[in-house]
Image (cartoon, helix red, strand yellow):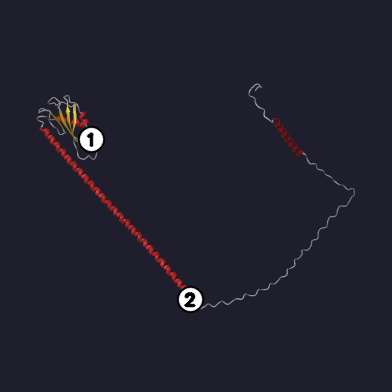
Amino acid sequence: MTGNSPYSVPKEPGSIRAILLAAAVHAALFAFLWFGIHWQSQQPIAVEAEIWSPEIKDAAPTPPEPVPQPTPVPKPEPVIQETAPPPPVVAPPPVPDPEIALEKEKKRKEQERKDLQRQEELEKQKQLQKQQAEEDRKDKLKAEAEQKAAKDKAAAQEKQKQDAAKKAEADAKKKQAAADAAADNKRHADELKRMLGQAVGNGPANSTGTAAQSQGPRGDPGYAQKVGAKIKSNINFNVPEGLAGNPAVEFDVQLLPDGSVASIRLRKSSGVSGFDEAVKRAIERSAPYPKDSKTGSVPSSFTGIHKPKDQ
C-alpha cells in the first residue's frame, strides 16, 4: 500500500516494548543455563597432609589379653509359702418336702396327659382334614366325570340330530331328484310321443332328444338323430360332482333355408346355467345344418333336448 492509498494497515501499539521484553527473557534464560552448567562442571579440590616428627620413639606396647572373669552364679530367690485358704463351708442340702414332691409329680403327670391328649386331638384333626380333602377330590372328579358325560351325551345327541337332519335332507334331495327325473322323463316321453304323433305331417323325432319339424311324410327318419349327435359332439361341459338327478334343457331352434341358425329360444332350463350355456353354444357351432336327404331341404325348426349326464 502506498501513502496515497485510502487503505493502510495500522501499526500495532507496543511492538518495541514487546521485543525488548522478549530479549530480556532470553538473556536471563541463557545466563541461568550457563551458570548452572559451569557450577556442575567444577571438580572438588582434595588436600592431603602428612605430619612427621624428628624424634625416634618406641612403638606402643601391645595391650595385654583380657583375663576371663568367672560367670556370676545367680542367687536363688527365697520361696515364699502362701497360706492355704480355709476350706469353704458346705451347707447341708435342704431336705425336700415329700408333699411338695408329690404335688410336682402329680402336676408333671397331668401336664404329660394333657400334652398327649392335645397331640391325639391334633392327629385326629389332621386325619379328618385328610379324609375331607380326599372326599372333596373324589366329589370333584365325580362331578367332572358327570359333566363330561353330560357334554358327551349332548354332543352325541346333537350329532345324531345333525346326522338325522342331513339324512332327511339327502333323502329329500334324492326324492326331489327322483321326482324331477321322473317328471323330466315323463315330459320327455310325452314330447317324444307328441313329436312321433306329428311325424306324419311334420317330421321325425329321435332318441337323443332332438326333433326335426316341417319335414312332411317324406322326411328321413334318421335326420333328427344326426342333428342331435352333431350338437352333442360340440357340447363342452364337465358335469359337477354331486349333481342331483339328470335335469334336461330344451331349446327351440329356428333355421334358415341355408342351414344357419335364425334364432335360439330357451324353452326350459335344466337349472344348471353352465350346461344351458354349453348346449346353446353347441347349437350355434353345429350350424350350418345339413339338408334332409329325402326332401332335399333344411327343416324350418327343431327342438333340442339334452341332459348333462347323457353327454
68 and 131: which is toward the camera? 131
Along the horizontal axis of the image, is 47 left or right of 27? right
Nearer-N-terminus badge (1/2): 2
For residue 309, above or below residue 136: above
For residue 217, above or below residue 102: above
The residue at 17%/28% (across/down) is: 254
For residue 1, above or below residue 240: above
* Mark 2, other Cα within 10 Å: few <14 / some 14–19 / many ≥20: few
Position of the N terminus by quadrant: top right
- In percent of width and height, residue 297 lies at 14, 25
Q: Residue 253 occupies which quadrant of the picture?
A: top left
Residue type of the residue flagged with mark 1: Ser
Along the horizontal axis of the image, is 173 left or right of 70? left
Which residue in the protein does label 1 denote? Answer: 273
* Gap in angstroms between the C-alphas marked 1 and 2: 114 Å
For residue 179, above or below residue 201: below
Residue type of the residue flagged with mark 2: Glu
Q: Residue furthest right?
A: 55
For residue 43, the mark is none
Are the residues flagged by discs 1 and 2 in contact, CB closer than 8 Å?
no
Element at label 1: helix
- In percent of width and height, residue 68 lies at 79, 61
Q: Residue furthest top?
A: 4
69 and 311: which is toward the camera? 311
Which residue in the protein does label 2 denote? Answer: 103
